[in-house]
Amino acid sequence: MKKILLISLAFIIGLAVVAQKPQLKNGVFVRNYKKDQKVTIEPAEKISTSAVTAKHSGLKNGDNSNIVSVIDLGTSANVLGYSSGTRPMVWADDDLNCVINFHRAGPGSTPPSLSGYYAMDLGVDLGLSEDSWTSQIQVLAAQLTASPYFYDASRYPCAGIYNPAGNTTLANAYCAYFGPNFANLVVSGFGGYSYGVANLVDHADTTKHIRWYNPTPYTYIPDGFNISTTGVAHMTDSDNNVESGSVVYQDSTIYGRGVWNAANKDFDYTFKTIAFPCKDMYSAADAKVASSPDGNTVWMSVLTNYAGGTLGTAPLIDSTYYPLLRKSTDGGLTWGAPIPVYLDGPQGISGIKNNYSDFFIQNFFVGPPYPTRDEIPYTTAFDHSLSVDKWGNPHLGVVVGYSPGGYSISTGVDSLLTVYDIYSPDRGATWCAVAMGSVTTFRGTWATYTSDNRTYISRNKSGDKMFFTWNDTHIDGETNNQNPDVFARGFDLVTNKLTTDNGLNAPNNVTFLCDITQEAYWQCTSPIVFTDNNKFTLPIVTQWFADAAADSKFKYIPDFSYTQADFTQASGGCDFPIGVQKNEELATVAVYPNPVKDLAKVSLNLKQNANVTVEVTNLVGQQVMSFNKGSMSAGNQTFSVDASQLSSGVYFVSVIVNGQKYTQKMVKE
């Protein structure tokens, strides 16, 4: 009887929610956008050899020192060089002062390449000048001939830089890439993976691997890719069955974990599926992965409509997107249970529910009575970006807006959509949201190709600052995002303050008045920014084209930066600096010398008397030594770890204090 009553109550609540669903006023121009299905196959076109000549909007640089520079990089056969959402394709390394732009090949590649090849542009010395760049370096060639094209023709790549711990020599670093290909012997369209590495100096030092989906799990188009400082690569891809010609989600994400093999100079991958339950086949929009600066904490996020919530915690309507996350605390070896992040209703995030002003609600929603803040349904957009701060907390850069239902997001009204940092200050127990800026437009359409706001999130190397970039068109009367600029904002997690635009609580227009003003198409920003003392430079690349079906050119912005003095606006987020755990941290740990040859010292500062144990693990999580220190007194303590018998490489020294683990990386020479 209790179960029947519970179901009846849920049904009544559901009717009430439907009956009270807010409506925007008649006469307000609103366009409903649904998720675009990703391209599964393209014509086997030959690439053009014509050069791209940039057009200008007629705006001159003048003497304004805030105008950024623009450097031409390589080319792609068409706009799909940067297609399929916010995948990582630009990657900066703060220790090597270099940056890569990874993309489908186009005219001018060395050696000559087809559109199914991968190419890399490499910038040294921060990529500050044209002379700093070598473009169109061929990384992957399609070689498995088939009709009408190559089985290993590759598309939509993810890429990053693997730099061994402590290395400052470019020749010892590699670009690692991962993307889909046509290696599918069952149906046309994507069905395989292409992945490997390429040395940043010796361009002949490359590897290439092909993985076919048959047998299952089905492979599709990887959205997420990350390389941690510990030499572990992480890949995520929605597990979709496309055999019927439609994309059918299989309630899981494919996770690839690659461990650096120093002997082979390559990543050794293992693959498995991880459940991300959803209400129906339409609900998985994007899958991302990111690791903390120390590489130990890894988060995976999917935009979905997870139906596993209890009564009273589900979203207001069931056809909305919101984040669903899993956490790993051992570098991706094991994963915790799914964590849904609800945006609306009584359990929604206050930073989102309180973003619309009373004036906005009364002028754009039907009333009176006007909807309360607990009655407005919200949804994320259809792609997002993920980062992890120095304390192991996840941050999601994503557009959120009013949901009319039907897996749609409404746009066309200024301030209806907002870019947020949705984050947890306590590793997933609670959630906050800070608005980075309103979005005026949402989707741009060029011929048959579309691109949304492309919200990217980046962090500094230490992980205590986050930076957000996105595309938006700010032209009076324009409702499509076809003339975009790049907008940016910074978030200092220690002071809880944001950057401003000349003192205004707003983002900065990065490309204002520069050579690509209102033509900064399909931007991509590195997940790591360059840091020089208190200066933080954001490596941003846009893809310029005159014809979406013809060649496109990548353009690098080398000189957009923030300084510490720019963080002046209170964020309005959580009531204490993110990552600063109130009365939670029991100890601080340091390991020295590092790198170590024989004996490492562990310095432990205990805040109270505690039981202490020590574990040392290798890169793949295997325990190589452990010892129990027993009860130790509060204060400074020092003890040794004998590393003389360990092989050269990276290890992790974990000190467990009353059940809490504190981990430091140790490099054995």
Image (cartoon, rainbow, N blue to C red):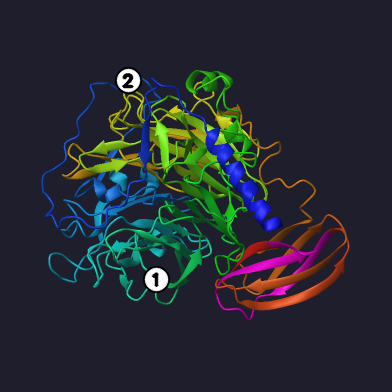
Based on the picture, tell me whether residue 484 belongs to the magenta stretch.
Answer: no
Q: CA distance from mark 2 to mark 1?
A: 47 Å
Please tell me whether the stretch drawn in magenta is mainly helix, strand or loop: strand
What amino acid is at disc 1? Pro
Location of residue 185 (image quadrant):
bottom left
Location of residue 610 (image quadrant):
bottom right
Vertical placement of residue 170 versus 540, above or below: below
Q: Magenta residues?
A: 636-662
| Marked residue nearer the N-terminal end (2 or 1) | 1
Q: Quadrant of the N terminus?
A: bottom right
Along the horizontal axis of the image, is 405 left or right of 218? right
Q: How many marks?
A: 2
Location of residue 294 (image quadrant):
bottom right
Query: Where does the image place residue 285, in percent across and percent down from the top left?
Result: 42, 51
Q: Nearer the viewer, residue 294 or 378?
A: 378
Q: Nearer the viewer, residue 651 or 485?
A: 485
Q: Nearer the viewer, residue 413 or 552?
A: 413
- Residue 470 visible? The answer is yes
Residue furthest to the front in view is 1
Vertical placement of residue 494 versus 106, above or below: above
Along the horizontal axis of the image, is 32 left or right of 387? left
Q: Which residue is mark 1?
A: 217
Query: Where does the image place residue 451, in percent across and percent down from the top left?
Result: 32, 41
What amino acid is at disc 2? Gly
Query: Where does the image place residue 256, in percent across and percent down from the top left?
Result: 44, 67
- Numbered disc 2: secondary structure: loop
Q: Nearer the viewer, residue 498 or 337?
A: 337
Q: Residue at x 33, y 57 (%)?
A: 157
Q: Which residue is mark 2?
A: 477
